[in-house]
Every structure is written in structure tokens, then in C-alpha cells.
Amino acid sequence: MVIDYSWIDNTFYLLQKNKKASCIMNDFLIQHKKTIFLFILVCLFGINYTIVLNGLDNNLFGIVFSILLFLIGGRKTSFNMNYPLLGLIFLLEFVSYRLHIKSLHFLSLSLFVCFIYYCFTQKFSFIAFICIILFSSLFNTFFDYLTVEIKQTLCYGVYLTLKDFITITKIEGVNFYINNAKITIDTACMGLSMFKTGLLAGAFLLTIEERKQEKYFTIKQILLFCFLLILLNIVSNYFRIITLILFNCTEENILHHTIGLLCFVFYQIVPMLFLVRFFKPKKEAIKNDKTKKFSLFPITIAILIVFVTSLEIKKQQDYKLLTNISSDYNISKGVWVNTEVFKIVTPEKLIYIKTPAHNPLICWTGNGYKVIESKVIKKNNEEICFVRMEKNNTQYFSYWWYECDTKKYTSLIEVLFVKLFYNKSIRLVNETSKTPL
């Protein structure tokens, strides 16, 4: 009996051939990895071009400058940032995937660019990383939601300061009544643009100091400096409001903008230039040129996460705004403003039914209404938000809440968690009239 062992030779030959092909493929990937990943990056940005264009339109200078700062100020670090960055991208994309929040997806794309750069160079800049977060639409949204509270707190602080020096009849939110005249502090006086500009200038100064000393700031030093800049911004806006009231110059004109710039220079830039002298970099730069081995696994996972989320977020979403809506609302008389807003006009009140992304405070102030008072009240044993506002010397009373399964909420974060984990539809109901409801 003759046994044929030729199959063993064939198997060995195939294994050797596959191994050789695998080696050729690996060599090809290693040699052209930069070109390949650059092509993948361009494709991902092409898929998300509308989101990218919208994000750049909102903060073009800040985002571009932050990424350039990341490239210029990046340093080799002994701390492995692969998995912290991958974890942050996964978290942002998970929330974006579930809630279809395009601003979070854009922030994730920005961090993905930094992640690609780090994977190839092993360089990272904590200063630029903070700037990218601050110039994201996420931070803008966070600031917008707090604008009314910030304005009212600052204005009340100004009132306590000036009441013993000038005659202030009363204060209502952001309205000062002085000598039978009403002075209103607008949203621009909160200085969000000045706040960002100050932080960007601070980041630039820290980066220059690092390159000059050839050492690097610790994370604690960077966070402490940012905290001091935030305090300086509050002080700047505080004195800006005081000066505008004393000069009775709350309308936008040359003097109004000049006062804003002077306060920014004297209460933010000058103190910042003084403070930076006391912040000296402590960490020595890594001298050796030994770079960590390029790891394909985390970057591949990041690409898959971003790609899957990009496809999901492009889908048309059914918000189910009118599903199980209360019979108190006659939806037959309503009209769709767009896919996210439904409007009902009655002789007594104006009703909007929207997605949670549409904050009434932002919408009303954006349409020229000035918020006088904002608070949470109880109606029918349920907490709802109340806003008293004014336009063309006419007062309006607006009530709004988030609604899920007929239960009312006043916290956006709370309803977003409900949607995130239970995937339930959420709507925002806003009722406005000229008389208290």
C-alpha cells in the first residue's frame, strides 16, 4: 500500500504562499500607511461634509487655530494617549449615534484628527486639546443654556455694587431702572467671544513659553491657568456692565464696542501677561527619539466607530413629536415650521412643539425678545420653566417643559439620559401668551 504525502507538500506550499502574501501586504501598509490613512480621513470628512462645514462656519478661526496649536505645540509624551483618546471618541460617538447630536459628532471628528496625528508622531498637546473642546459647538450650546442665569447673576452683582452710589429704582433680571429710564443689558455683554479669545490667547502664551523654556507645563498648571482666565473673564464682564451703565451706553455703537475692548484688554489680557510670568514649565522634554511602535488596532477601531456613526447620523430621523400628544392641543390647526418644530396658533396663546435641541430661551432672544425673569415654577403639582420677556414694550409670559410618556421635566440633561438609555421619544412644549396662563 502506497501512501500519498503530496497533500502535505501542497499545504506547506499554500501556507508559505499565504505568509508571503501577508508579509507583502503588511509591508505595503507600513510603507504607505500615511497615504492610506490620509485617504480614509478625507473620505470620512467627505461623508460628513455638511456637518464639517456647519461646524467650521460657527467657529472657523478657533477650530483651525486650535488644531494648528496642536500641531505646533505637540510634544512627545511618555503617557500612552491611544486608549484615552479612543475611549473619548467612543463616548462622544455613542452619544451622537443614540441622540443624533451633530455637534458632538463634529467634536469627535476634530479629536479623531488629533488621534491620527498622535498615532503617527506620538506627540500630544494638552493645551490645544482644551482649546478644541472650548471651541466646539458642544461648549457653545452649554454656554447658551447658561447665558440667562449668568446674565442675571452678573447684573444683580452690579446692582449691589452701584445701588449705594447711583439711584437705581429697581432691577428686573437684566433691566435696570435708573431715573425713570430703563437700561437693558444684552447677551453680547456676556462676552462669549471675548471669553474664547482670552483663552486662546492664554493657550498661545503657554505654548510660546513651553517652546522658549524647552520644558512643558503639567496638567495641573494648565487647568489652574485656565481657571484664572475664567475668573478674569467674569471680572472683565462685571466691570464692562458697570461701565456701560455709568455711560448709559447699552445700545450697540462705537463707544459700546470700545468699552468692551478696553475692558477685555485691561481686565483679561494685561493680567494674563502678568500671571504667565509666575507659571514656569516643569516637565523636561523627552530627549530620546525612540518612538513607540505604530499600533494599527486602536486606529482601526476609531475609524470603524467614526464611520458607523457617520452613516447613522445621516439618516432621516423620526422625532415622533405628535405621538400621544395631549388632546388639549388641537393639532389640526397647527403647521409644521420644519421637521423639528410644530406650531399651533390660537387667540389665547402661541404653542410650539419641538425637539429638545430647541431651547426656548435661545429661540426667543434670537428673535429680539429680552428676558426679564427666568425660573422654575410649579403648575398642577408639576415643575415647569417660566420666562417673562419683553419686545417692543410688550410683555410676554412663556411656559415650557420637556415631555416623555406624559411626564414633565425641566432638565435637558435628565431627558437626554432617558433618551440615551431607553431610546424614548422626547418633545419640548412651549406655550406663550400676553397674560399669565
Image (tube, rainbow, N blue to C red):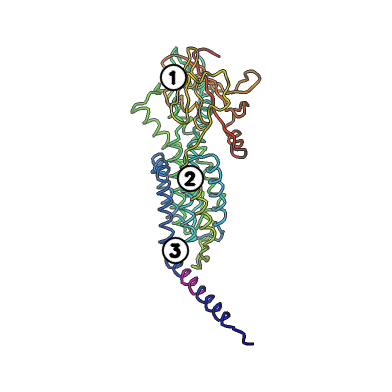
For the residue carrying disc 1, how many other residues have a C-alpha within 10 Å: few (<14), some (14-19), or many (20+)?
some
Q: Amino acid at mark 1?
A: Ile
User: Percent position (x, y) of residue 83?
Assistant: 57, 56
User: For mark 3, what is the residue?
Assistant: 33
Main SS of residues in magenta: helix
Q: Is residue 157 above or below residue 416?
A: above
Task: State which quadrant residue 211 falls in.
Answer: bottom left
Q: CA distance from mark 2 to mark 1?
A: 38 Å
What's the residue type where badge 3 is placed?
Answer: Lys
Answer with mark 1 or mark 3, whichever residue precedes in sequence.
Answer: 3
Magenta range is: 19-26
Q: Secondary structure at mark 3?
A: helix
Name the foreground residue: 83 vs 259: 83
Q: Residue furthest left?
A: 254
Quadrant of the image occupied by residue 54: top left
Q: Is residue 233 above or below residue 287?
A: above
Where is residue 190 shown, x and y percent of the image?
Answer: 46, 31
Residue found 44% across the figure and 63% down from its top: 33
Question: Is residue 25 within the magenta segment?
Answer: yes
Q: If the image is split into quadrants, where does the N terminus sit?
A: bottom right
Q: In 3D space, how far apart are the residues under numbered discs 1 and 3 (Cα atoms)?
A: 61 Å
Q: Is residue 337 above or below residue 206?
A: above
Residue 330 percent across, percent down from the top left:
52, 18
Residue at image location 47% in from the left, 21% down from the top = 334
Q: Are marks 2 and 3 in contact (CB under 8 Å)?
A: no
Q: Nearer the viewer, residue 361 or 268?
A: 361
Q: Nearer the viewer, residue 230 or 9?
A: 9
Q: Choose the circle earlier in sequence order: 2 or 1.
A: 2
* Residue named by callout 1: 183
Residue 400 within the segment the image draws in magenta: no
Residue identifier under label 2 = 107
Q: Earlier in the sequence, mark 2 or mark 3?
A: 3
